[in-house]
Amino acid sequence: MARVRSSRGEGARLRDELLDAAEQLLAEHGDERDVTIRAIVGRAGVTPPALYLHFPDKQALIREVVVRGFDDLARTTGAAAEAAGQAGAVAALRAGVLAYLGWAERYPGRYRALFDARRETQLLRPDGTGTSVAFDGLVARIAAVQAAGAARAGDPERIATLLWAAEHGLATLRVARDRFPWPPPGELVDGLLVTIVGVAPGALPTGAPLGGTTPGFSSSSAPG
């Protein structure tokens, strides 16, 4: 049943609920083409005219879902990197990668909507290539490690692409194969930084939690 017309001041909440509904459906169906206006308003409990008060069409709504998700991911990874930055560029990069994995575990539906679902709606640079604020932050942190002389030289965007692919693999596999005896997240991330970014093992943070529980991960995600 459709809800009663929103009172003044409730428009922002309805807009968020429409975004949540579209995000949930995108994660469930795995394909933007299967997410319809009818399904979105049905999930949110409103009628199509209520949706069109906030978004001109489905594409605009999906685009806002994507922007919101990547902004949230960028804030999370950026905040973790900034908090660890006092210990140096490597510590900041490491913290950002761990935060990425933790975010994927805490918000599996949002993660699937961003990375696993087929989307025609993408965020593009002026040259037509895809990007996101979260990815740009990863590139910047890798460049900072290189500038500090703590990693081998190379195109930071290409290295970030390889690191992101590995992050995504870990984030997906740790959920899909939760009975596999995964090493602690810190050990996995350190391995990525050494092999992909070229960080010398001795440059890794000395206080890094290489065993036990890593911040951002639930105890249920530990190998068992």
Image (cartoon, helix red, strand yellow):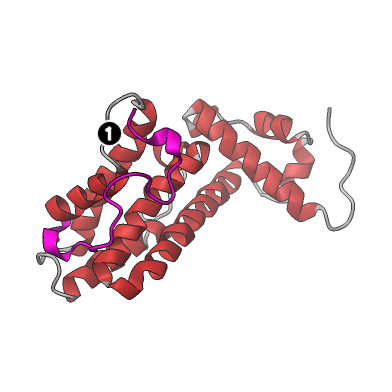
Above or below, 80 against 122 in this view is: below
Q: Nearer the viewer, residue 86 or 93?
A: 86
Amino acid type at mark 1: Trp
> Which residue shows up at 34% across the image and 62% down it?
136
Residue at image location 74% in from the left, 55% down from the top: 12
| Span of residues in magenta | 197-224
Left or right of 212 on screen, residue 160: left
Is residue 203 shown left or right of residue 9? left
Q: Is 206 contained in the magenta span?
A: yes
Q: Quadrant of the N terminus?
A: top right
Q: Residue at x 46, y 54 (%)?
A: 73
Mark 1 crowdedness (10 Å alpha carbons): few <14, some 14-19, many ≥20: some
Left or right of 49: which side holds 223?
left
> In the picture shown, does residue 176 fall above or below 54?
above
Overall secondary structure of the magenta stretch? loop
Residue 105 sits in which quadrant?
top left
Report if residue 136 is visible in the image.
yes
Question: Circle 1 sits in a helix, a strand or a loop, which is it?
Answer: loop
94 with respect to 19 (left or right):
left
Vertical relation: 203 (above or below) 22: below
Provide residue 47's location: percent of width, then percent of height: 79, 35
Which quadrant, please, contains the C terminus?
Answer: top left
Q: Pinpoint residue 189: horizontal percent, then vertical percent.
A: 25, 49
Q: Which residue is mark 1?
A: 182
Could you tell me which residue is drawn at 29 percent across and 62 percent down? 93
